[in-house]
Image (spheres, rainbow, N blue to C red):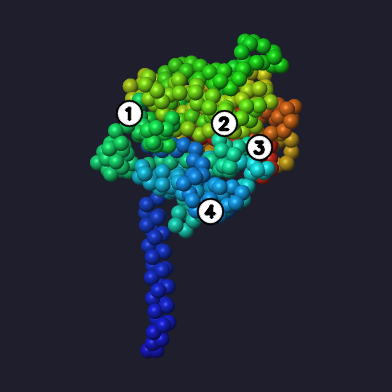
Amino acid sequence: MRLLPQHKLSYVLIMFSIAAAAYGGLRYLGANMNERIITHQRPELPYADAVEVAPGSEYFFTWGVTASPRMKEIAKNSVENRYGDTYQQTFSVLTQLTADLAEVGLTLRDVVNVRAYIVADPEPDFDGWNRAYKQFFGTVSNPHKPARTTVGISRLFHSDYRVEVEFTAVFPDGRGPHVVGTRHHERYTRLSRTETSEQWKSYGRPVWPMSTGKATAADTGMFLSSSVRPESMIPNAPPGFFMFGNIAQQSTSLFKQMGAQLKEAGLGFEDVFFIRACVYPGKDSIGKSFAAFNKEYNKYFNNSKNPNRPTRTVMSTPGFNYRKQNISIEYYAAYPNDSDRDFTLAKSASGTTRKVVDSQPIASAGVAIAPDARMVFLAGSIPSVEGDMKEQAASALEALKTRVELAGGSLSDLVHIRAYIAQGDTKTLDNRISEWEALYQETFGSDNPPAITTLPVVSIVGGGMIELEAAAAIKD
């Protein structure tokens, strides 16, 4: 038998070791994929079309994360921007979110939904976002792909921020802070946090007005709200005579409506675990607007009466500033164990919300989701046609329908639908929103429709007029 030279033999052994390690690593990843998650993904896409979650799962909702000034390796490579460009900030943000997941016993393989807001400067750098994103998901070391939505926005709290990202993740069986005896449960117990609900565990610094994450317990019934916009200060005024006041008065209106909606749904401010706020660029500075919103926020949260600090995402979009509405919010809440809510159906609507253009009722103020429903998270869907708004909205909705059907559901199972509308001039935007809302009513009717958020944004991936994302709840 002919022997290989020593250097060639060493090379073969090294390559064999690398291959064996890679094979073992992939087997390990495969064996440790989250069994509570089923993904429907295509090789050509960096995200999943849909992600199913088993009934009764424990969730982790993160806050909206932006680039950290502590990431000095970004700052030293940037002359114009001390936080880096879109690619660098995305890498920073996803690294931070990976660490936040690890703190509660999760990995990137447990993420079911990603929502990304990319600042336009003057146009959003979607390529930079995607380039960094692909280093974390759909890789050899992490083949998992979550559902994802990406939109272009006006700006974030700091003028140098380019990216904000939020995750929704699911705990595998036997892991996380709710599992007594695990190190993550013991670690949380040492934090000695004050919670207003037995349905979650909070993370983040106690001095902050919001949590960095909320870990919900198994079998938690949830309430997802429609978008809440300021009410006119002149009741029953014609559309051209609406008056909404300054940002402080509008924030007061939002939380007043929120309180009424929660009460009707059998909940209170102590049950809210997530808030998403959109502040629109108006005559006031963004910082001043955020400060006014926070002042009103602190009347309801993070105080001696209600120490609850919801997880929160805040950004600025074109929104409805052209209508002199400078802010909107949406929120999630958790039903306590002793709730008398009837969860016979997978979802049930509560209250009503209004159309954007004429303020007539269009949908529920929010939807309650049964704790034993199978959740499905659907990726943002864009139109595949280049027609007018009516054609593009129908195309995007058809794509959404195809995605929910992958999980054995239908459009009637949707519990929340978010429509991002590319901005135009006032008349163009109103027409686009009216076309979308007409399609929504035609599709879902008035019998238990999904909660709805309609939000004008700077731009949509692919240059279309609309992008739709949704979540569904299914009782098998």
Q: Where does residue 364 sit, x and y in percent of width and height?
A: 54, 21
Give the labeled residue for mark 3: 458
Q: Which residue is drawn at 57% across and 28% down?
A: 288
Disc 3 to disc 2, how far (Cα)? 20 Å
Instruction: State which quadrant residue 57 falls in.
Output: top left
Label disc, if present, on residue 287 of the rendered structure:
2
Label disc, if present, on residue 194 of the rendered structure:
1
Q: Where does residue 135 sit, x and y in percent of width and height?
A: 51, 54
Badge 1 marks a residue whose secondary structure is loop
Label disc, if present, on residue 76 of the rendered structure:
4
Q: Which amino acid does label 2 sit on?
A: Gly
Disc 4 to disc 1, how far (Cα)? 39 Å
Label 2 packing within 10 angstroms: few (<14), some (14-19), many (20+): some
Task: Please say if the residues under marks 2 and 4 sit with CB atoms less than 8 Å apart.
Answer: no
Q: Which amino acid does label 3 sit on?
A: Val
Q: Which amino acid does label 1 sit on?
A: Thr
Between circles 3 and 1, the one closer to the viewer is 1
Disc 4 to disc 3, how far (Cα)? 30 Å
Label 1 packing within 10 angstroms: few (<14), some (14-19), many (20+): few
Disc 2 to disc 4, how far (Cα)? 26 Å
Q: Residue at x 41, y 68 (%)?
A: 18
